[in-house]
Image: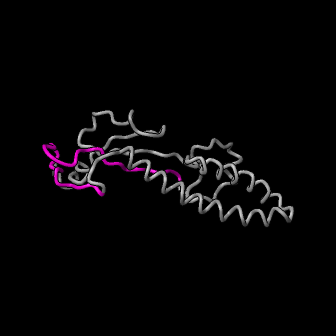
Amino acid sequence: MDAIAQVVRVFPAQGGSASGRENITHVYNTIDPQRDIEIINTELILADLETVTKRIAKLEKEARGQNKVAVKTLEIIKNIKNILDEGKLACELKLSDEDLNWCAICSYSPGNRCFLFLNTDDVETRHASSLPGDYPTVAIDIKIEEELPNVRG
């Protein structure tokens, strides 16, 4: 996997939306992109913690046998676990290109980029300034994307 793309809803749930989406509900009945991003990130962190913890147990056994690859990989994986334990995404750990080559074990590589796609009814409005993380952000109107195939020229 080369990147993580989070699609987060930022258009209003009810009343007066020009896009006709006023009847679309949210699982929490409120629109809170920051909360949604934090939930997604928590799920990613927990999945990676599970993967890394299992990998560390296996690598520790291999490293006891003086396996040089296991020793180096274990060092890097423990650094990744430390970042995850701090509640940060693995992609927030800055690794050298050499270290990245050792890290094909997470549900996503820690070198992957994270992107936010903001599903909005106003692509001109800037939403990113109030959102967590320092990720590239793109505002999109999925409703327009859905309708494009129906446009006949």
Above or below, comparing residue 115 to residue 59 in the picture: above
Check residue 14 for magenta coloring: yes
Q: Is residue 85 left or right of residue 102?
A: left
Tell me residue 2's x, y (percent): 53, 52
Tell me residue 50's x, y (percent): 59, 62
How many discs mark residues in the rendered view?
0
Check residue 139 for magenta coloring: no
Query: Who's the residue at 33% across and 41% down the image?
Result: 139
Q: Is residue 53 left or right of residue 89?
A: right
Q: Is residue 115 left or right of residue 77?
A: left
Q: Is residue 141 left or right of residue 7?
A: left
Q: Which residues are magenta?
A: 2-27
Tell me residue 30's x, y (percent): 27, 49
User: Which residue is outermost to the right?
Assistant: 66
Tell me residue 16's x, y (percent): 13, 43
Query: Who's the residue at 61% across and 62% down the image?
Result: 51
> Is 51 or 70 nearer to us in this picture?
51
Asked which quadrant contains residue 136, the reply is top left
Asked which quadrant contains residue 130, the reply is top left
Query: Who's the residue at 45% across and 45% down the image?
Result: 115
Asked which quadrant contains residue 46, the reply is bottom right
Q: Main secondary structure of the magenta part?
A: loop
